[in-house]
Every structure is written in C-alpha cells, then in structure tokens.
Image (cartoon, rainbow, N blue to C red):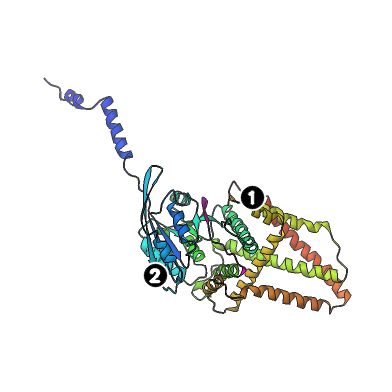
Amino acid sequence: MTNTDDRYVNSAPVGSELDQLTSDFIASVESLPEYRPTIGCVIPAYNEAESIAQVLESLLAQTRLPDIIHVVVNNTTDDTVKIASEFAGPHIREINGEEQFTEIYVHDIGKNRDKKVGALNYGYTLVEGCDYLLGVDGDTTADATAVEYLEAEINSDTRIGGISAIFSIDDTVISGLIPQFLITGQRTQFAAFNMQNMLRGRNMAVLGGQFSIFAVKALRKAMEDNHQSTPWVKDSEVEDSLLSLQIKSAGFLTKISAQARADVGGMTTLRGLDAQQVKWNFGAIELMWPGQRGDTKGQPFHPNLRLRWLENFSMLVNGFTRLMFLVLLVSSLSIGAFVFSPIWLIPPLAAIGLNLRIAMSMKKRNSKDILFALLLFPAEIYMIVRLGHFFRAWTKFLSRKQVDNWAAQAKAERGSGNGYLAPMLIAVLVLALIVFAWFQLDVITQSTILWIGWPILGVITGIQTLTMMSKLFQRHRGYKV
C-alpha cells in the first residue's frame, strides 16, 4: 500500500534542485530592467551662433545623455537655427558598454515677447512627460559627468525639487586686459557665492537657468500652488530666482550640486556686465521688498532670500566705508592732520587673505585668480564696479519707473547704452560737492569732524575685519567650487 505522504515528498524538489530553482528565480529578478528616470533637456537660445555648437557638443559628450534635447530659438537675428540644425536628429553613443540614445530637435519660435521665459515654457510643454527637466543656457558648457551627477543627486532624495550645477567661467579663451579682469572678477564672485551655498547645507537660493535639473513633479506643484499655467512667469526680472522660491515654498528642497560643474558665458565689457548685474539685483530687490510691485509679491522673510539681504547689507556697508575713508583721508591731508597707523594695514591684509582663500577653493583656479587676490587692487576695483551695479539697481527700483531690464541687457550686449557710466559720474559729483563744502568750514569744525569721523570708521571697519576673519578661518569641508 502506497503512502501518499511519501509519494508527495518523493515528487518535491529537494537539496540541490531547490537551490537551483532559487538561484534561477533570483537571476530572473535581477535580469529585469531597472527603471531609469527620463531627462528632457531644454535650451532657450537667443543669438547664440557663437556658442550653440559647443553647448550641444558638450551635451552629446555626457556620460549620461539626456533622453531628448530641445533647442528653442527665439527672437534670434543670427545663424543660431542654422548651426543648431546641423545637430538635429538621433544620436547613439556607447558609454561604459551601454548604448545610450538621445534625439535633438530645433524649434524656431520666431518673435516672442516673453523672450527667455517664453522659450523655457515652450520647452516645458515638450518635456513635461519626463521625470526631470534639464535647463541649459545657450552659452553654457558642462563637464562630461555633469548630467550623471545631477541625476544621481536628485534621485537620492525625493524631497529635492531642483539642483544647480557649480558655475564658473572658462577664461582660457578670453583675451584683452579689461575682458580678462572682468572675467576673473566674475569667477571670484561666483566662487564666493557658490561656497556660501555649499556651507549652508548645500541649500541653493537660486536654481540658475544656466545648468540646473528640476523634478517635473516639483514644477507642477509650484504651478498649482501659484495658479500658474507655466513654471516660469514674465513678471520677474529674475525668473529663475522666483521659480526657486516657489519650489521651496511648495515643500521641496533647492540644492547646489557637490560635483556637477558647468562653465557659463561671462560678460567681457563694463557695459554688458552692468546691464546683467543691474537686472539680477533689481529682480532680487523686487522679491525681497515687502508688499506688491505689479504682479510680483515681495517675500522678505523667505529663507531663500536671507543671503540676498546679507549681500545687500554688505554692499551698503562696503560702499559707505570706502566713501567715508576717501573723504576722511583727503580731508586729513588737506589740513596736514593725517597720521599713519600700522593698524590700518590689518583690514587690507584680511581682505587679501579672504580673497586668496576664495581663489584656492576654486577647482579650476589659475595664476590670474591667485594674482587677483594677492594684488588686492584688482579685487578692490571690481568691488567698486559692483557697488555701481548695486547703486543703479536700487535707484531704478526706488524710482518706481517702469523699465525693461531684459531689453536693456540685450542693448548693452550689442554695445549700446551708457547707463553704466552714471555711478562713476555721480560719485565724482558727490566727492566734488563734499570737497567744496569742506573748504567752506573753519579749522575747528574740520578738526571736530575728523575727531568724530575716524573713530566711527574704525569701529565699522573693525567689525568688517572680524567678519572677514571668521570667513577666512571657516572650514570648507572639502568642497571645491
């Protein structure tokens, strides 16, 4: 008589057979393709004939190709469309034994009154089905691993709504004394700003449109919360800053990458730099200022704007101390009352030390960056140039006059406009009036002003010096900008 239990046991897989089945099952699971997020790249391009080929070559050289690339050309009057169209079509590359595919589309949307904002929103409609939107400016090239790093970082935390690359400027192709000076100053300015954000937990106040990746779900939430039909709006002079605020307010994190790097297009003329920086500063002031200015609502207490407040206060103090020092120095010399004290060497030495620390924090630093810091005068002249931008932006804002700073920047980049000279002319006029008024005073009044003025300047400069020293000895935690 057959035992049914024995028959069941004999028919069941045992020993090595069970191990083999388990191994086969695990192997079949592991062989299933992993889900790979999709990245849609949008490149708004306006008169980028000189750089668009390098931008597309940079993207095609990435270790992680975007899944699709849309070049959105708007208001252009040069050969941007013609040059970009040479790259249109499918591209297949083998990377680390893996075949990657992307396709480039070129869209000429003609005249568009919303300019870059309109191009970005047009591009968004083309890639909103992707997981991520990669925004790249038409003059920005990136390291070959930039997209790979950005994707890995944004994938690592579902709370992240966007990540900006570490920006700098490639100065190897810049010639001429003034252009090299301005580019070196901008490299230092970017480095200091990037390091500030790095040391704040890599929280980025502005997801710059130059080379940033956005989670499409974060863009959708920002649009929903602000009753917008598009992610970017034309109300603000700094569309990327406003969108960054909205993403943060929607509950997402805005970060700066720890490794992804990109080189942006720098301004090589005083006129162009002035127009760009005034537009940036003006837009930031609009976002900082309490109340409603047109369609832009000020958000003075937004966490993304804390650095902006600090920057503006710092520029105000820097302008005041430099003007006060110059006036007191000339006034003291005019009546033979100037007495040199070695203690006044401490602030410039601290400034040199801090500038050198910033230069050494650059991953791609060169001799020009080091000399810019060590010689002090180039950094000081660049600070005076920046003070002019600061003054112009606040003057424009407080005048409440309607201005199109986008048009002003485009005009300046074409070599037109002399507004950048206004701060210098006003400074000369103010100094002339101060000198005239000074010589109308009697000697006792002059001595009293100097007796009060120098100690006040000394206290303010002392506080500035302590601030510089604290930054000088602050740990950079291994970050490179």
Label 1 secondary element: helix
Q: Is residue 300 left or right of residue 158?
A: right
Whether residue 225 is visible here, answered yes or no, is no
Q: Is residue 266 left or right of residue 123?
A: right
Whether residue 97 is visible here, answered yes or no, is yes
Q: Which residues are magenta?
A: 257-270
Give the camera-side residue of 211 and 171: 171
Give the camera-side residue of 59 and 422: 59
Identity of the amino acid at label 2? Ile
Identity of the amino acid at label 1? Met
Query: Residue 360's mark?
Result: 1
- Which residue bears the numbered disc 2? 109
Label 2 secondary element: loop
Q: Residue at x 64, y 64 (%)?
A: 178
Gap between marks 2 and 1, in whole Å?
44 Å
Quadrant assignment for the N terminus = top left
Q: Is residue 263 magenta?
A: yes
Q: Quadrant of residue 337?
A: bottom right
